[in-house]
Amino acid sequence: MALKPRIAESPQVRLLDLKSKPFFIVASVEVGNTTTKCILTATNMDTGRTHIINKVVKMTRDVRGPKPGEVVFGRTLTGVELTRQSIAELVSNSLLESLDKANLDIKTDLNFVVRSTGVVAGFDSPDEVGEFVKALAEGCLLAGVPPKNMTPPMSTSNIPKKFQKYSKMEKVVFDGAVAGVLPPIGSTGVEIVANEMEGELATAGIKEAAKMTDVDFRNPCISIDFGTTLDGRITSPDLPYAKTVGNFCGYAGAIPDAIIRGSRVVDAKLGTALDVLKGEKPTSFLTLKMKGKVIQEYTKRINDLIIIEKVPEHRTRYGSVPVSSEGAKEVGVVLIGCDVGENGSDMGKLSAIGMEICKKYGVQVISAVIDEVMADVTCRLVKVAKDEGLVFEDSTIGITGRAGITGNKPKLILKCLDEMGIAPKVDERVVFVDDGLARGAAVMARCMNSLGTPQYPLGGRHGGKCILAQRVKLQNK
């Protein structure tokens, strides 16, 4: 029987409902290596459903250049220079544009803002991400976001009146667990891998989106976010909170970007796969059939250049992402990385193969090769997790990010996982989610405000009940 990908999609929501029903409205502001997004989400506190209101997506490479006197404190993977002021302006403009499109007021309609960044490759150590997060906060303030909408409230009285009855703050306090998962023990996680916060948000977002499918994506689970850089988490089956027992890091969308840059149909330095394949239909069946052998040959050549492994202990950077493999070992977290050479030293070889494919066969075949390559990358990451004993009997897998959910990738990923024998009826265990990170921001905001929907739990184990009572007991010890 054919495997059927479960793809979570967001239903539309009307402005009238946003104003009249108990919708908790959150902006997710994310500055990534390729795109800067402001995504507005609205969670109906009666149903626990999160809707995406709109998204404003800009190319990060279009950020304004440094002005005299500004300090460059980081760079994107393609070397675009960033300053605190330029990032603040980019964030402010994106946020205002998003709210304007939605006809919402930043001071009265927006309930919370969650900020994150995937631009970690240009930093020297994981803790430098803190500077970047400050720049994001400055951008939100510049746009007019009240400071109280960026930090957890101290008491129920600090929560807007219409949401107070949904808050569980009198029973439980926010203790760092998001959607029933604790960050790596003894740290915030950022000390272990620079984009751990993105992994946290992606995991929470996939948990929320899976509610729109028949996949129960609660613990234990594996979440993989294929943005430009790779992030994600592996969680344990523990109760009431699962532990983070694995993290992903390295390259993801940067791989198709490198392949497409060789084609010369995009800018050789700043071009991305998004420029060419955006809105592209999956490669036609005819092309796949006629060029099947060619596609497989190129896929193998590219996969031979991609290294996927448990991050070796001596590395301080893996796939350009700052990591602390010693720190990970100390707290019992397995770091699984994806690199091309050492910190991208073989990316040029991917571009050379991309040039060859484009000259001989065109963009349709490049698209097919990229789909095959990224499906193989997914399965190789899961295999390392399995070899490390981190795939449990009831583990589910969630995939988000442009390099994991577009084109034919979902079908190819399911086929490959099925062949690996990960689980019987594997398609009932895997969910594909658009904008996992933004949905995760909505979940994070609710966790910070202790706004729960116990009848639709995100925490706990598959098939289990809400963990609120266990959390209360734990916190009252």
Image (cartoon, helix red, strand yellow):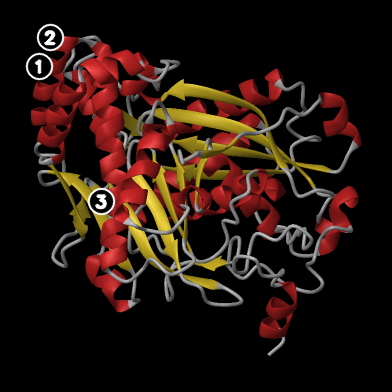
> In the picture, residue 109 is in which quadrant?
top right
Query: In this picture, is 13 found above or below 413?
Result: above
Query: In this picture, is 25 found above or below 444?
Result: above
Could you tell which of marks 1 and 3 lies nearer the N-terminus?
1
Q: Which of 286 and 306 is in front in this view?
A: 286
Residue at image coords 28%, 14%: 287
**10 Å crowding of disc 2: few (<14), some (14-19), many (20+):** few
| Element marked by disc 2 | helix
| Mark-to-mark CA distance, 1 and 2 | 5 Å
Q: Which amino acid does label 2 sit on?
A: Lys
| Element marked by disc 3 | helix
| Mark-to-mark CA distance, 3 and 2 | 29 Å
Q: Quadrant of the C terminus?
A: bottom right
Q: What residue type is labelled 3?
A: Arg
Residue at image coords 83%, 62%: 156
Residue that label 1 marks? 356
| Element marked by disc 1 | helix
* Residue 380 badge: 3
| Mark-to-mark CA distance, 1 and 3 | 25 Å
**10 Å crowding of disc 1: few (<14), some (14-19), many (20+):** some
Residue at image coords 51%, 73%: 237
Q: Could you tell me if residue 331 is visible in this image?
A: yes
Q: Where is residue 279 in the image (x, y as percent from the top left)?
A: 45, 16
Q: Which amino acid does label 1 sit on?
A: Glu
In the image, taking residue 9 as reference, residue 109 lies left or right, namely: right
Residue at image coords 84%, 58%: 166
- Residue at the limit of the structure toward the front, as seen here: 1
Q: Nearer the viewer, residue 214 or 259?
A: 214
Residue that label 2 marks? 359
